[in-house]
Amino acid sequence: MAGSGCKAVRYLDQIKAGPARGGLQLLAATDRLCVWSGSEFVSVYQRDSGLLEIVYRLPSSVWQVEVDRKSERLFVLCAGSGIYSIPLNQKCSLVEETGAQESFLDDSQSESHGRRRKPRVCVIGVESCIIKDSAICSFVVLDDIVVTVASGDHKWKMFFLRLPPASAEVQLCRRIEEIDFALRPDLTRCEQSPPSHHPPVLCCIYPQTVKDTEARGDDYLCLETSLFSLLFSVDANMLNSPIILCGLPDGQVCFMPLKHARAEAKGQAPRLTVLYHLEQPVVFVGLVTVKERGSGDQEHQSSTDKPPVPDAIVVIGKGGKVVIIKASLQMEMWLPNFTQYHLRGPVVSACCRAGRLYYSTRWDLFSVELVQRDTSFGAAGTAAGERSGQSDGVLPSILTPISLNICGVVAVSKPSLTTKGDVELAALTEKGKVMVCTLPHSSTAAHSMNLKAASAGQRIKDLLSGIGNVSDRISSLRGVMERKDKALKELNQDFNICCALLSYQESQEKGTVPSNQPIGCRVTAKWNCLLLRDSLVVSCVLENLSDWPLEGRWSLCVKLVVQTPALTEASDSTAFTYSFPISDLAPGKTMEVTVPLHSESGSFIPLPVSVHCSLYYSLNSVLTGIACEQPFPHSPLLSPGLSETAGICLFLNTHIIDLLDCLHIQGATEMASALNSSRKASTSDPLEIFLRSVTGEKLKGSFSTPGGGSAAKGPFSASIKLSVDLVKVAVKDLGTGNAVENGSDVLLWLLSGNPEVTALRVKPVPIVHCTTPDGSNVTLLSKQVAVNDFSVDAALSAVEIMMECSSLTTFCFLHQAIARRIQMLLEQSSPSGDSLPTLRVQCLRQLVHRAEALLKEVQSLRDRLCIGAEMDLNNTADKLLQLYGQLRSTDLVIV
């Protein structure tokens, strides 16, 4: 809609503190202007010259100012203290001029205006407080009565107090009446907001009398007798009782007649009635003139003419809802008519004069014509108007706001007319500027046709500027909507991913057979060659099998946890955490990341290591649109939940990497050549092949030497026997091939998690030569043997797994890895009692007694070390190693 703009704008001053609850009010006709903001200062300006006349400094922030022109006093409501009475023409204590100016004027304005204005600064003390009540939200002064509204527990309280005489010393007001009325809990929201945000709006309306209208002037709002009687009863009109209108933050518009004759009678409290419910916070209640005049535009009449008596009440809500209440002739009866309109909100301040409304929405100031001009009435309406002495005013079907191109206005004063017929409107902006706006005296179509060329060009520029501003706002809003739509789509697909993963985890916890994991992570240990140096890394392949993509809001988090206490000085930490942002992983695609298996010092991490994989979702990226690149927080990865940095962690899986997964297996050619050289030595015993492959000749067991000198140097060897029936749980085809193929199948089962196991599939061999991450040599041998001592019926068929390593530490990790796989095999198998062989109890007892004797020797050596009885530590260590070797080389068979 086109904006007419302002004729002129004159800035009076700029307050340093921006208004939190500011306002303006005219004093003594139109020659002075009272301004207050969120600070503790109240400034009085000479409106015509723009000079700052006097500044009052209150004890706390100013919320509301009312004027009693009859006694020439200001009544100021301060936050958390009460109402203060300030005489306008009485001397008060002054403070330093320069310091006071710097406290309420902007720094840029103090130098240019400080010398010219030289205002008086008066400090108002607590002795000027006439009503001490910290709960007061709003008040109004009428004659010698003060009406206050305070907030209580789920109710409002209205107090009536009598002012002390103006000539007397400052003293507290005397309370006359008190009224409690409840809130509307289903509609109000005022309990959630401070009282200063949406204070109640109080307005005093008098019935129309010739004497009052002429004597009191514009300060007293007088309403036409017919509407006054219709709304507030004939009794109130006959008693000339003022009416208190109260607009509450919950939308209620209540009224109560102030009956002077019975106000102080006991048990005769005034009756409060709800006039209307606006269903949004009330920001303005005022009177307007709707009825037609025969002498042209009533608003722009000469200032010397007698103003018309208002004949309608206008109520405006914060959301832009407008209700005009007027008397309407219906079926030859005058009845109140409530007409609703809707303006663009939020409305922060409003004022009206005659039939025109001015309101601010912070980003613009608008003018609205409330009366439809030049409207012809029907015969019935004209006749009725002649009988009643007035004509029924016509309201427009829709309110059309006209932009005045003034932004940031938070408070406006009641308009006034200049001698030229223009409208002057004082305004206070959210940046603290105080200005007087002169509006053109007419905005009708007939006047716009007589615009000069320069004015028409300026108006075109204003229209184009307004169109450009609207276009920029539309583009900005469109961009905001597109970003919100994109964010909602992303949240929808991320929510589906979370539901799919949580449903899969719930199925696993219940023990049911879950479907395929929607998003999984495969973990393997791999050898990489970088700069002619082999390095061991953990490869994590993230596979998206869901129907939704993983985008930049997700990150793959990998945490390595050392399960075994460090046996060497290589480990300087027990956990390592890594985070990898995911750019765009479409359904069916994979992403591979690698994590080093060494600590910050460069040494390899002791094995086994558990690898925990999780997906981390950043909630901040949803709001900012930026992918999460920060490291994953140090919160546990095993349980999903909200992290410290506003994110969600979803667990994927856990994989354990031991020494068997990290062995560097030699090629099939090397293993085959070692096997052929052993066959040329005229031996077919696999044990002989195993021993000759390491040293080239038949060796004795490392732990069989009684001296212990060679035990600490290695190589170290051990063997584990498993029944064939137990091994068949993992190796289905065991026993169908020859000895070499059977041994190769067992080794394939042991090294199934090693990516280099493909060398055994090329050429099956029963012996494997490997290299560990720390450079030690490992040899594994598998052969099928018959054990005659255990079974009663026949020889027990078993598979013997032999291992040998040159390092004691690595040998312990190797034995632990093989034992873990056997434990997993035992958990998978569930043999029945009939399938187990009949064992010889005497043979088992002998083996148990032998093991107990070895354990007693070990305990004895350890006790002697604790008390310091053993002086030769090397000899003691050799003895312990020899005993541990004998314990590990037991002839027991796992069935």
Image (spheres, grey):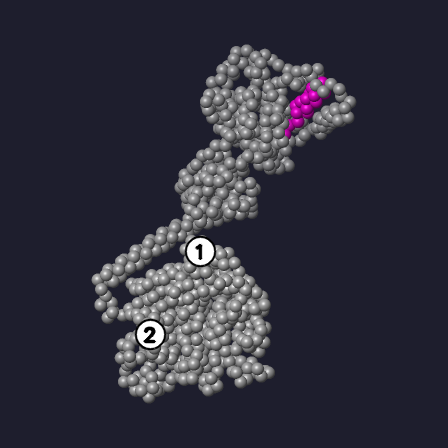
Looking at the image, which residue is at 45% across and 46% down?
621
Relative image position of residue 266 (x, y in whole percent): 59, 83
Quadrant that contains the N terminus:
bottom left
The residue where tag 2 is placed is 299
Vertical side of 517 occupied by 531: above or below:
above
Graded by Cα atoms within 10 Å as few (under 14), some (14 to 19) or many (20 or more), the crowding at tag 2 reads many
Write down the region rendered in magenta. Answer: 875-894
Q: CA distance from mark 2 to mark 1?
A: 38 Å
Relative image position of residue 365 (x, y in whole percent): 36, 63
Graded by Cα atoms within 10 Å as few (under 14), some (14 to 19) or many (20 or more), the crowding at tag 1 reads many
- Disc 1, SS: helix
Name the residue type under label 1. Ser
User: Is residue 663 visible to the viewer in this orientation of the structure?
Assistant: yes
Q: Is residue 716 left or right of residue 443?
A: right
Name the residue type under label 2. Glu
Q: Quadrant of residue 167?
A: bottom right
Q: Quadrant of residue 867?
A: top right
Quadrant that contains the C terminus:
top right
| Residues at discs 2 and 1 in contact (Cβ within 8 Å) | no
Disc sitting over residue 649 in the figure: none
Is 645 or 762 nearer to us in this picture?
Answer: 645
Relative image position of residue 323 (x, y in whole percent): 40, 73
Is 718 or 216 nearer to us in this picture?
Answer: 216
Vertical side of 226 occupied by 468: above or below:
above
The residue where tag 1 is placed is 110
Q: Quadrant of residue 434?
A: bottom left
Looking at the image, which residue is at 49% across and 71% down?
89
Looking at the image, which residue is at 28% across and 77% down?
296
